Amino acid sequence: MKVLPRLMSYSVFAKSLLLLAGITALHEMQAQTVRKYSNEFLQIGVGGRGLAMSNAQVATTNDLYANYYNPAGLVHINNTFQIGIMHSEYFAGIAKYDFVSLAVPVQTKKKVLGFSFFRFGVDDIPNTLFLVQPDGSVDYTKITSFSAADYAFMLHYAQTLPVEGLSIGATAKIIYRQIGKFAKAVGFGIDAGLQYHRKAWRVGFMARDLTGTFNGWKMNFTDAEKQVLLQTNNELPKNTLEVTTPMFILGAAYEGNIKDKFFITPEVNFAFTTDGKRNVLIAAKPISIDLMAGLELKYVPAKDIDVSIRTGVGNLQRSTDELGKKRFTVSPNIGAGVHIKIVSLDYALTNLTTIKDQDGGAGLYSHVISLRLDINKKQKE
C-alpha cells in the first residue's frame, strides 16, 4: 500500500480523498435534516462583474446575470434578448463550474422571462473501494472512476410595479445532485427579489430559498459495496431529506459620475443566514450576518462602448494561525470588463489572499471568464 501514493498524481490523489469525503458526507446527512452550508455551489456567484465585486450585486445587477443575483433587475434589459455563459475552475482545475443563462423581455419590456443552468462538478474521481482484495493483495485493475456533480435548472420572471423605479422578480429552481451511482438527490426551491432605483441610488433585496429548499437523497450501494464499507468501519448512508434554510440579502449602491466619461459605482451587501452560527462578520444564533462590498470604475468613450475595472472584498472570517493567535481574514477580488456593441467580456481573479498557501504552493484562487451577447432584432419600418 505504501507504493500507491507515489503512483498517483496530485489531482488523482485529491480526487481519491473526495470519494472518502463524499461517503462521509452522505453518512452525516442522517444526523440532521437542516444542514449548514447546504447547496453551497449556488452561493459561489456568477459572472466576471459579480465575482470581481465579491458578489455585491443585489442592488445594481441589471442584465441577464440578475437571474442569479436578483431577478428583479432583469427589467432593465433593453435588448430583444441576452445570452450569457461563464466558466471557472477550482482546486487547481479539479472542480469545474459552468453557467449558461438567457433573458427575454416581453410585453413592451415591462416583463422579462429567464432561464439558467448551473453545473459544479468533479470528474474522474477514482473509486478505490475494491482496490484491496480479500486476501490483502492490491489489484489496480479494480479502480474505476465516477463524477460528483451538482446541477441547477432555474426559471425566472420579473416585472415593473406601479411605483416608479420599483421592480419585483422570482425564481423557481430544480436541483439535481449526483455522486456517481452511489447517491442522487432532487430538490426544489423558490427565490424572490425586489429592486428600487431613484435617481443615482440603488436598493435591492433578495430572499434565497424563501420557502426552504428540499433535497431528497436516495442511496444506491450494492451489497458488495456495503460489505466493504462495513469492513472498513464505515456506517452505511441512508436515504434522507436535506433542507436549505432561507438567506436574505440587503444591498445599497450609488451610481455617480466622477468627471466627463468616468463613472463610479460602490455597492455594499449584507447577507443574513438562518442556518445557525457561521464563521462570518457577525456570528450569532440563529442568524449570522456576512458582508460583501464591491467597487466599479467605468469609462464610457462612446455609445455602446465602455471599459471597467472592479474590485471587492468578502469572505470575512475569524481564524486561528499555527501559533494559536486569532486573526481576522478577508478575501479581496479584482477584475475588468469591456463592452463593445453587442459583446460584453468580463474577467475576475478571486480569493487573492490564497494565491499561495503556507508551503508556497497553489491556493484556492480562481480565474473567471464570462461572456454576454446583447441581441437586438431589427424593427420593421
Image (cartoon, rainbow, N blue to C red):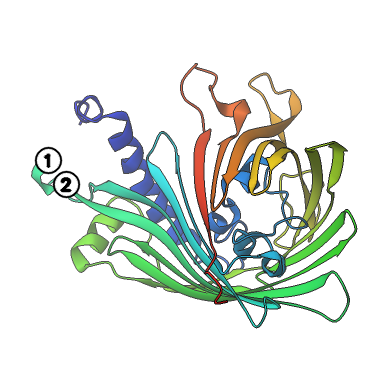
Q: Residue at x 68, y 32 (%)?
A: 332
Q: Nearer the viewer, residue 295 or 160?
A: 160
Q: Which residue is drawn at 87% across and 73% down?
A: 164
- Point out which mark residue 267 bears: none
Residue that label 2 marks: 143
**Which quarter of the figure has residue 297?**
top right
The answer to whether residue 107 is seen in the rendering is yes
**Which quarter of the figure has residue 260?**
top right
Q: Is residue 33 left or right of residue 130?
A: right
Per the image, label 2 sits on a secondary structure element best described as loop
The answer to whether residue 211 is seen in the rendering is no
- Image quadrant for the N terminus? top left
**Amino acid type of the residue that numbered disc 1 sits on in the rendered structure:** Tyr
Q: Which residue is drawn at 23% across and 24% down?
A: 6
Q: Disc 2 vs disc 1: Cβ atoms closer than 8 Å?
A: yes
- Whole-percent x and y of residue 294? 75, 41
Mark 1 closeness class: few <14, some 14–19, many ≥20 residues within 10 Å: few
| Mark pair 2, 1: CA separation | 6 Å
- Whole-percent x and y of residue 353? 63, 27
Q: In this view, does 149 lie to the left or right of 201?
A: left
Residue that label 1 marks: 140
Q: Nearer the viewer, residue 25 or 166?
A: 166
**Amino acid type of the residue that numbered disc 2 sits on in the rendered structure:** Ile
Mark 2 closeness class: few <14, some 14–19, many ≥20 residues within 10 Å: some
Q: How many labels does the image show?
A: 2
Q: Which of 289 and 139 is in front in this view?
A: 289
- Image quadrant for the C terminus? bottom right
- When the figure is inspected, residue 168 is found, relative to residue 144, above or below; the finding is below
Q: Residue furthest top?
A: 360
- When the figure is inspected, residue 299 is found, relative to residue 341, above or below; the finding is above
Q: Residue at x 53, y 69 (%)?
A: 378
